[in-house]
């Protein structure tokens, strides 16, 4: 008996139309509530949003509809993806809470916000941003160092934005203050696709003790 043709063919083949299980079901993106002064930043945020949608990876982010936060959220939604915003009551108006996301969590404090974002996500990506972004990035690296999580962290190095951060971390390591195995936790790339591929490669080893060779 041959394979069904016409409408039946679609029915038989429908299981294969299921999206593949994403390697990162959810990624948390830290990024600016501003857009910066170079169009490359917004462009990169939109590219990341589109790439996450294509990977069937859900976005977890600060819940705003301003700056790069708005760019990445609007892009993933425009490409058929899903976003979870996590925002505080106080920032709901200041950062224009995004009303179009599939899920908006409104919490009391910044600490709750960070904790919930970190719990929901399977990895973290930082885009260019200001003090809030840097604070979130360093806290998530510090949590990795403490073993609070074992999730990879990626820097989308748009236009060399994160070069000084990478230099600072290298300096901290050189001077004997870093206890985190950075190469097993942090990836720095200038393109979303390469960044996510690098993070996928770290998924099983991120911030875990090196396998014993004895
Ligand atoms: P920014 O990178 O300064 O534009 O902020 C990006 C996001 O980080 C915003 O949603 C801020 O509310 C948030 N954020 C998280 N922690 C802090 C903090 N310690 N100081 C300022 N903003 C913060």
Image (cartoon, rainbow, N blue to C red):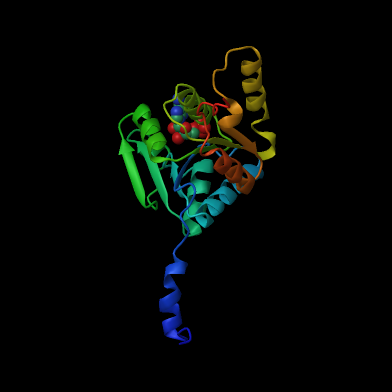
Residue shown at the point (54%, 26%) measured from the top left: 212
Measured from the top left, where is residue 201 in percent x and y?
Answer: 58, 41
Number of marks in the rendered image: 0
Residue 78 location, x and y as percent? 49, 58
What residue do we see at 62% from left, 42% from top? 41
Out of 81 and 121, give the one closest to the viewer.
121
Residue lying furthest front:
214
**Residue 87, relative to residue 8: is it above or below?**
above
The reply to whether residue 30 is in sight is no
**Residue 47 visible in the shown view:** yes
Q: Tell me what residue is drawn at x 56 percent, y 34 percent.
A: 129
User: The C terminus appears in which quarter of the rendering?
Assistant: top right
Q: Position of residue 164 (x, y in %)?
A: 66, 26
Q: Where the N terminus falls, by quadrant?
A: bottom left
Relative image position of residue 138 (x, y in whole percent): 51, 25
In this view, 26 is above or below 80? above
In the displayed structure image, the side of residue 123 where residue 175 appears, left or right: right
Viewer-nearest residue: 214 or 84 = 214
Is 13 positioned to the left or the right of 160 in the image? Answer: left
Rendered position, 32 above or below 167: below
- For the residue pair 178 and 167, the one nearer the viewer reads as 178
Residue 159, relative to residue 52: is it above or below? Answer: above
In which quarter of the view is residue 149 placed? top left
């Amino acid at each position: 008996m041959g394979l069904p043709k016409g409408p039946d063919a679609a029915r038989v083949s429908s299981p294969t139309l299921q999206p593949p299980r994403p390697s990162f079901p959810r990624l948390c993106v830290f990024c600016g509530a501003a857009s910066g002064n170079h169009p490359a930043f917004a462009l990169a945020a939109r590219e990341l949003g589109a790439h996450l949608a294509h990977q069937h990876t859900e976005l977890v982010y600060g819940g705003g509809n301003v700056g790069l936060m708005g760019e990445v959220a609007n892009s993933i939604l425009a490409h058929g993806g899903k976003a979870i915003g996590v925002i505080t009551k106080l920032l709901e108006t200041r950062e224009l809470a995004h009303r179009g996301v599939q899920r908006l969590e409104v919490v009391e404090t910044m600490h709750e916000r960070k904790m919930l974002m970190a719990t929901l996500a399977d990895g973290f990506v930082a885009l260019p941003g200001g003090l809030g972004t840097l604070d979130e990035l360093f806290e998530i690296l510090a949590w990795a160092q403490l073993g609070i999580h074992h999730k990879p962290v990626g820097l989308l190095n748009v236009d060399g934005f994160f070069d000084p951060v990478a230099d600072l971390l290298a300096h901290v390591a050189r001077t004997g203050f870093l206890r985190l195995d950075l190469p097993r936790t942090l990836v720095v790339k200038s393109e979303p696709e390469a960044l996510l591929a690098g993070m996928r490669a770290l998924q099983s080893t991120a911030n875990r003790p090196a396998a014993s060779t004895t």
